[in-house]
Amino acid sequence: MTFLWTAQEMIEAMAGRPFGSLPAGITGISIDSRTIAPGEAFFAIKGDRVDGHDFASLAIANGASLLVVAESKLPALGRLTVPMIVVDDVLGALQKLAQAARDRSSATIIAVTGSVGKTTTKEMLRLALAPSGKVHAAVASFNNHWGVPLTLARMPVDTRYGVFEIGMNHAGEIGPLSRMVRPDVAIITTIAPAHLGNFKDIEEIAAAKAEIFEGVVPGGDVILNRDNSQFDFLEQAAQAAGIDNVHSFGQHAKAEFQLAEFDGAAELSTVWFNHGGETREVVIGAPGQHIAENAMAVLGTVLLVGADIDAAIEALAQLSAVKGRGARHRLSIGNASFTLIDESYNANPASMRAAIAVLAAAQPEGEGRRIAVLGDMLEMGAFSPAVHAELASPLLAAGIEHVWLAGSEMAALRDALPESVDIEYRATTDELVSFVTGAVAPGDVVMVKSSLGLGFGKIVSALLDKYPAFPDTGRQI
């Protein structure tokens, strides 16, 4: 059996002490007792809401072969007979194991941050690099103080390319994670007013994202969005951090990895990628100019790390939007169908505009409507009324005449839209759920988007529960 870690390696890396008769090694790492697989180690992390130690018995029942627990919790776990490694702090131990994973690895490491597009860019990198070697990348959006070390500690020793997503809500969060990951290539997708309530202005957001430069290895590369207003600041920040290899992507005439032309369709995009005077046609299997722009950074990364560019281009055609980030469902209603675009995972002003553009490109059938179902963008602070009201402009420019809203902050958008727009407003998500599920009609294209805290996933789930997949696909489209 091939182990991810031997027990002895874990003890040494984490400065832990064995308790009981330890297995020779483990096949994986989990912090979720519900989904742990047999042979994996369960790290009993204490989070903001729950303490993993309270779920140790469930982890054992589901097959955990080893527990990593805190010394202070050991007396309460004395009745358990499963082997354990006892440490001072479980999250700290996971971080130490992550550092050991990085130290032992010869993989090329790529880290992605930015206000919008991190997860999709990570998934494009996973696809594009896979033909050239074994890729290890984060699942879902594991991009915070526990998600990054968990992803790093899970990296097999024979990984060829490691792809990491690094996020933040406040200044000072990205730097330590970047120093842990130590990327060979760092990408900043864009700077936009996300989490604006925690910052004075967009310049402070740019400075927080620039913390990713702190971990870039000597001789490493940075790829920045040349179309973004913060490009000059970020370029200077990278150079100040001692990084000589600063590259750019975007539509800008001086972009090194240039989006020379974009042809968007409802469910995919065709773009022309220009580098060094050579232009290549690229089909991307998901719609949206924002995705196409980030694909330029992905292809630039492929070139920088010496992977197969032709295979990478071919792989991008297989891209499909993921749950909560543009996944499409064609659903039956009577003898007809409607299309659901699931953007329910998160929202800020830039990603709202990108999603509105995707909705604008979608084609309703027959008498169908384009419907934007929108909820509050959280963490906007004092800027909240203005940034919500400003969404009226892209909605009107896109010709979207049906806007269904929920949340206290979306009242500002309701008030900013003219009477010519069909507006439905509900104070809560639950109230909007019942309205939406009863108001969709054949041929509609319904796009659902809000910050995660609004729970707009309920709207998506309710639609999927009520309306079966259209029989000509039986799958996401």
Image (tube, rainbow, N blue to C red):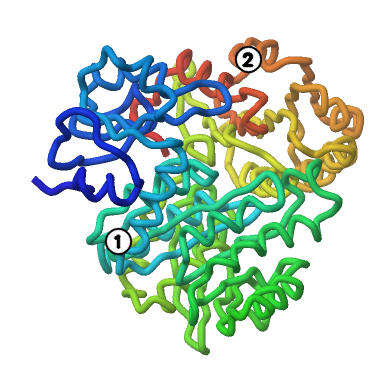
Q: Which residue is mark 2?
A: 433
Say which residue appears at 53% left-offset and 35% top-offset: 324
- N-terminal label among 2 and 1: 1
Q: Residues within 10 Å of mark 1 (few under 14, many from 20)?
A: some
Residue toward you, 325 or 87: 87
Residue appearing at x 77%, y 41% in the figure = 395
Instruction: Please identify the quarter of the rendering in which residue 306 is found.
Output: bottom left
Q: Is residue 455 visible?
A: yes
Residue placed most toward the observer, 16 or 57: 16
Query: Which picture quadrant has residue 438?
Result: top right
SS under mark 2: helix
462 to 416, vertically: above or below: above
According to the picture, the residue beneath numbered tag 1 turns out to be 130
Q: Residue lying furthest left in this view? A: 1
Q: Is residue 79 left or right of residue 170?
A: left
Residue 451 in picture, x, y percent from top left:
67, 33
- In the rendered image, residue 142, in percent from the top left (x then y), is placed at 48, 43
Nearer to me, 181 or 466:
181
Q: Position of residue 297 (x, y in %)?
A: 53, 68
Question: Residue 309 shows which numbered tag?
Answer: none
The residue that appears at 57% across and 35% down in the rendered structure is 345
* Quadrant of the image containing the N terminus: top left
Query: What residue occupies the far bottom of the structure in this picture?
Result: 277
Q: Which image quarter holds the C terminus?
A: top left
Identity, as a three-letter code, of the amino acid under mark 1: Ala
User: Residue at point 53% right, 54% down?
Assistant: 177
Q: Residues within 10 Å of mark 2 (few under 14, many from 20)?
A: many
Dot 1: element = helix
Q: Amino acid at mark 2?
A: Val
Vertical comparison of 24 with 439: above or below: below
Q: CA distance from mark 2 to mark 1?
A: 39 Å
Q: How many marks?
A: 2
